[in-house]
Amino acid sequence: MPELPEVEVVRAGLEPAITGATVRAVQVFDERSLRRHCGPAEDFVERITGATFAAPRRRGKFLWAPLDNPSRIGMDAAALVVHLGMSGQVLLRVPDAPIDRLARISLDLDHPLHGPLRVDFVDQRIFGSMAIDALVPSDDVPGDLVPGQVSHIARDPLDPAFSDATFFARLARRNTGVKRALLDQTLISGIGNIYADEALWASRIHYDQPTALLSRARAKTLLAEVRLVLRKALAEGGTSFDAQYLNVNGESGYFSHSLNAYGQQGLPCPRCGRPIVREQFMNRGSHFCPRCQRVAPAPATAGAGGGAA
DNA sequence: CCGGACTCCTGGTTGC
DNA sequence: TGCAACCAGGAGTCCG
C-alpha cells in the first residue's frame, strides 16, 4: 500500500508538473475525500481555486504542496495536503481526458510553461484525503514549515533532519514490540506493513521482539535495513500488486518482484529455505521466517546481551 | 504509556 | 451463475 517510496514517487512526479501551476477550477465528486479538510466542500473549493503551488514536499506518507499566495485566502501560510490512505492515486491527465470512475476530486491547473493540465485524485476506498491546511513551524528545524495535521508525524528516515540518536533513545524507552514501533508514525514515519516486514526480515528480527530488549547494535542494523529497503523500493518505482498503486502517469512500480517476506507465505525464505510464515498481528498480516527471525531472549542476569544468530 | 477494539471504505476474491 | 461473506490495512479515537 502506499508507504514512503510510493508517496515519494508521486511527489517527484508531481513536482515538475504542478510547481508554479495555478488552480483554475476544481470538482469535488465525493466529499468524503475531504474528511481531513476542516470545513465543507465549498470552503475547500473556495480556498484552492486561484491558488498557485510551490514545489511539493513530503514527510512520511503525507504529501503537501505549499501555496504561493496564501494571503489571497486570508492565511499566513497554507498547503494542499494529500494522503493516499490505502488506495489513493494522484494522476496527471490532459484536460479533456475522461474522468476515472473512482475519481473523487479533480483539479484543473494552468502551468505557465506547460499549459493546461488536470490532476485527478482517485481513491477506491476513500481512506485517503485532500485538504487545505495551515502551515505551522516544525518543532525541530527553525524556519521549517509543516501542515498542522502533519506536525505530530515524526520525520522519516530519509529526511536529512531525521535524528538517529533521538530515534534510538525513544525506541529504547518504549515498552512494546518492534513492529508496532516501526508502524508508529509519531516515532518514525513512512513505514507501513510491507516495508516493516521487509526490514525486519533483512535484520533477522522477530516482529514482536520487545524494543526494550533490542540491543543498540540490533537497533542500528534495523534502521540501516529500513533505509536500505526504502531506498531500493524507491529506485524501483515503489511496490505495486495490482492497479492499487500507480505513479502519476498511471504506471506500476517493480519492487513487488524484490520482496523477501511480505506476501511470501509458504514460499522458501531466500536466506535459509524454510517457508515464510504469515501470522495475524495488529489486525494485519505479519510475514517472517521462523528460523531467521526469533525473539531474542532477555539477557539472563549479567550476560553480554547477544541476539539470536 | 500501552494495547486492543473499533471506525472509516469498496473492489476483488473466495466460497457455497 | 449469482450472491454474500470476507479480506486488504493507514490512521485516528476511545477505552480499560
Image (cartoon, coloured by chain):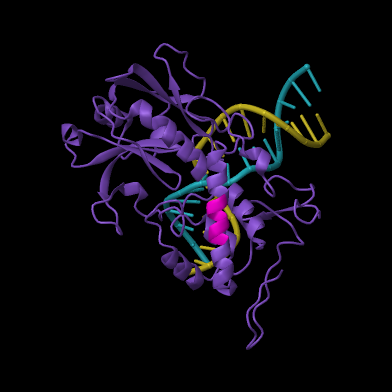
Chain colours: A purple, B yellow, C cyan
Q: Is residue A228 above or below residue A219?
A: above
State whether residue A303 is above or below residue C5. below
Residue A97 seen in this snapshot: yes
Of A195 and A39, the residue lying toward us: A195
Single out the residue that lies furthest toward the top: A96
Residue A283 visible in the shown view = no
Is A50 within the magenta? no
Residue drawn at (26%, 45%), measured in percent from left and top? A135
Q: Quadrant of residue A69?
A: top left
Residue A149 in percent (x, y) is at 35, 47
Please determine whether, in this image, residue A2 is positioned above or below residue A210: above
What residue is drawn where x is 58% and y is 59%? A179
Quadrant housing the N terminus of chain A: top right
Query: What kind of secondary structure does the magenta stretch mostly adopt?
Result: helix
Q: For the C terminus of chain A, which image quadrant?
A: bottom right
Position of residue A296 in the picture relative to residue A27 (left or right): right
The residue segment tinted magenta is A222-228
Report the side of A62 relative to A41 (left or right): right
State the image coordinates of residue A182 (x, y, percent, origin top left). 53, 58
